């Protein structure tokens, strides 16, 4: 199964959960043929394919308050590997308290909708 097909399945699966919002993060660069300038797009080099949040309700001592936990999902084919930049992104998100995972199937993100 291709990364694009896996990603589409993951987006459809996560889209069924009202507490999860994910967005496609296209990133890369384009060289303008007229000016020769390189135009970069996306969050940053190495940022994940899918980014978003999971809405959670805080513990009993903060009843009623809600917050959004940052989610970062890098989609890879079964044998795909993270680049060093993607590994740096994943580690930074995790250090900050977010969830950053590598997903090779819908099952890898099932815990987000449980």
Image: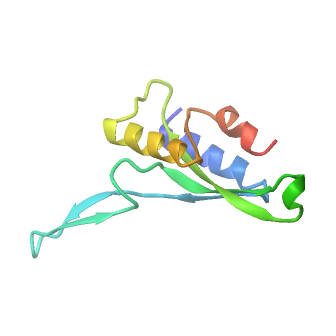
Determine whether 98 is above or below 68 in the image.
Answer: above
Determine whether 16 is above or below 32 in the image.
Answer: above
Q: Is residue 87 left or right of residue 32?
A: right
Q: Position of residue 16 (x, y in %)?
A: 78, 54
Q: Position of residue 72 (x, y in %)?
A: 55, 48
Q: Position of residue 40 (x, y in %)?
A: 27, 64
Q: Is residue 68 left or right of residue 92?
A: right
Q: Quadrant of residue 65?
A: bottom right
Query: Residue at horizontal 64%, vertical 45%?
Result: 10
Query: Residue at horizontal 57%, vertical 60%?
Result: 23
Q: Nearer the viewer, residue 8 or 101?
A: 101
Q: Quadrant of residue 89?
A: top left
Query: Residue at horizontal 51%, vertical 47%?
Result: 93
Determine whether 86 is above or below 38 in the image.
Answer: above
Q: Is residue 70 left or right of residue 80?
A: right
Q: Position of residue 57 (x, y in %)?
A: 82, 57
Residue lying furthest bottom: 34
Q: Nearer the viewer, residue 36 or 20?
A: 20
């Amino acid at each position: 199964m291709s990364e694009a097909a896996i990603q589409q399945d993951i987006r459809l699966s996560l889209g069924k959960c009202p507490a999860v919002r994910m967005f496609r993060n296209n990133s890369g660069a384009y060289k303008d043929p007229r000016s020769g300038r390189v135009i970069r797009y996306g969050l940053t080099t190495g940022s994940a394919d899918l980014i978003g949040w999971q809405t959670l309700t805080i513990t009993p001592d903060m009843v009623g308050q809600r917050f959004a936990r940052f989610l970062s999902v890098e989609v890879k084919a079964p044998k795909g590997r993270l680049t060093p930049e993607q590994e740096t992104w994943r580690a930074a998100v995790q250090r900050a308290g977010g969830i950053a995972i590598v997903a090779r199937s819908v099952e890898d993100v099932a815990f987000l909708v449980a």
